[in-house]
Amino acid sequence: MKIAIIGAGLTGAVVADKLSRLGHNVTVIEKSRGRGGRMNTKRLSWANCDMGAQYFTARDPQFINEIEQWQTDGLVEPWAFSPSLLRAKVLAASPDAELRYVATPEMNSIAKHLLKDKKLELNTKINHITNDDGKWLLWRDNMELVGIYDWLISTIPAEQAFELFADIPSIQNQIPHDVHEPCWAVTLATQGEVSDVLQGVFSREKVSWLARQNHKPQRQIEKRLTSEDKSGAKPQQKIDDLWNIHFDAAFTKQHIGVDSKNIQNIALDWLNELIINNNLGDGVRLVDGYAHFWRYARPAESYIAEYEKNKPTIIFDAEQQYAIIGDWAKGGRVEGAYLSAVECVDAFKSNSWT
C-alpha cells in the first residue's frame, strides 16, 4: 500500500512509523525544511530554541506507555518544577501534581527519531489534490505532480486541511475550519541575575506562558555566537538565561503583521516588569532574540469545550482511502496528536490493510 502523509509533526511521525512497521510504503511530505511541526526547535547561531510546545503531559494509558518507551530510548525526560501563576502583575506559587515531560535534547527529537529511516519530502508544499480512478494525485504550484498514492493521510491543522480539500466538497465539509488560535512565540537570550524561583509561569495578562528554557532537562546554554553586528563580525557575548514567552491569543490577534523586533521588545519589557515587580532581580539585558508567529498554535477554548461535549473521532474513509487527523481531532495537546495517529492505525488494522 503506497501512502502519502502530509505533515511531519508528531501525528505524521507516529502514523508513519506505525504504518511502516506494518509493511506499508509510506512517504511523508512536509512544507517546511524540518520535522516536528509545532513541537518545534529553532536552530539559531546563539541557541536552539523551543518555539512551539513547551512540554507535554500524559493521561491516556496508551500514551503513558509510549512515553515510557521514549524515556528508555533517551527521547524524553520529566521536567520537575513548581509552576507559578501571575495575576494582577503579582507572582504566586501554583503547585500542582501534574507530571510534565520535555523531549530531549530538543522538542523535535521524537519526530526526528521516528522519521529517521522514512521517505521524506521536505520543503514540499502540497497546493492541490485530485483523485483519479481511486488514486490520489498530489500537486505543487503550477500543477507540478509530486506523486500518486493509494492512500492519503492529512495530519496538518484543520484549517489548512480545509483549504487543501477545497476542490472536493464532500471531504471538505467534514473538516472543522475554525479550530485554532494564533500565538506570537518569542525566545530571549539575556544577561543579568534572576532568582531561581522563576522557571515556569502561567498568565492571563498579555502573555499566556513563560519558561526559563535553560532550566529544562538537557537545555544547558551552549557557548555560541550572537547575531552579526554592522561590521560583519560576530562578537561573543555571555548568555545567562534563555526565556520562552508565548503571548495570548487576544494580544496576538491585535498584533498580526507587527514587525518581529517590536514583538521581541514587548516581550523583554514584560519580562523585566515581571522580574522587578516581584523582587526577583534588577532586570535583564537583551543579548539576542527571535520571534515566530504561529497562525494555528493551539485549539481555542470554545473548540475544546465543543470537543469535550461531542467527543468526535478522526475522519477516516476506508472506501475512498483517506484520513484527516491531528491533535485537534482528539482534543488538542501533544497527547491528542499521538492518539489521533494511533486511532488511524487501529482503523487500518480493523480494515485488514496490514
Image (spheres, grey):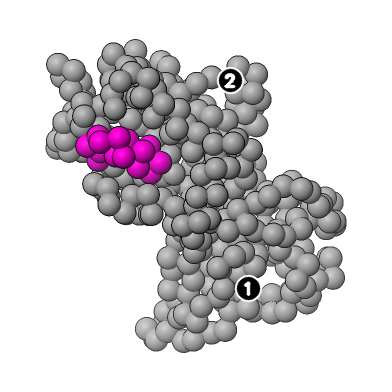
In depth, the one of 276 and 37 nearer the eye is: 37
Helix, strand or loop under label 2: loop
In the image, is residue 225 above or below residue 188? below
User: What residue is at 36 percent from the left and 38 percent from the top?
Assistant: 18
Lower sequence index among marks 1 and 2: 1
Region in magenta = 13-27
Nearer-the-camera pick, 254 or 9: 9
Q: In this rendering, would 218 be left or right of 73?
A: right
Please tell me in which quadrant of the rendered image residue 214 appears. bottom right
Q: On the rendered structure, is 236 left or right of 125?
A: right
Where does residue 27 sit, x and y in percent of width and height?
25, 40
Q: Is residue 248 visible?
A: yes
Observer-nearest of 348 and 277: 348
* Above or below, comparing residue 81 to residue 20 in the picture: below
Residue located 42% across and 79% down the image: 228
> x and y percent of residue 173 in the render?
41, 15
Image quadrant occupied by the C terminus: top left
Would you say residue 24 sits in the magenta stretch?
Answer: yes
Q: Main secondary structure of the magenta part?
A: helix
Q: Which residue is mark 1?
A: 241
Residue displayed at 57% across by 30% down: 331
Q: Which residue position holds label 2?
A: 311
Which label sits on residue 214? none
Q: Can residue 128 be seen from the camera position used here?
A: no
Q: Position of residue 213 (x, y in %)?
A: 60, 65
Q: CA distance from mark 1 to mark 2?
A: 41 Å
Identify residue type, mark 1. Answer: Asp
Question: From the viewer's perspective, is the residue at label 1 or at label 2 nearer?
Answer: 2
Number of on-image labels: 2
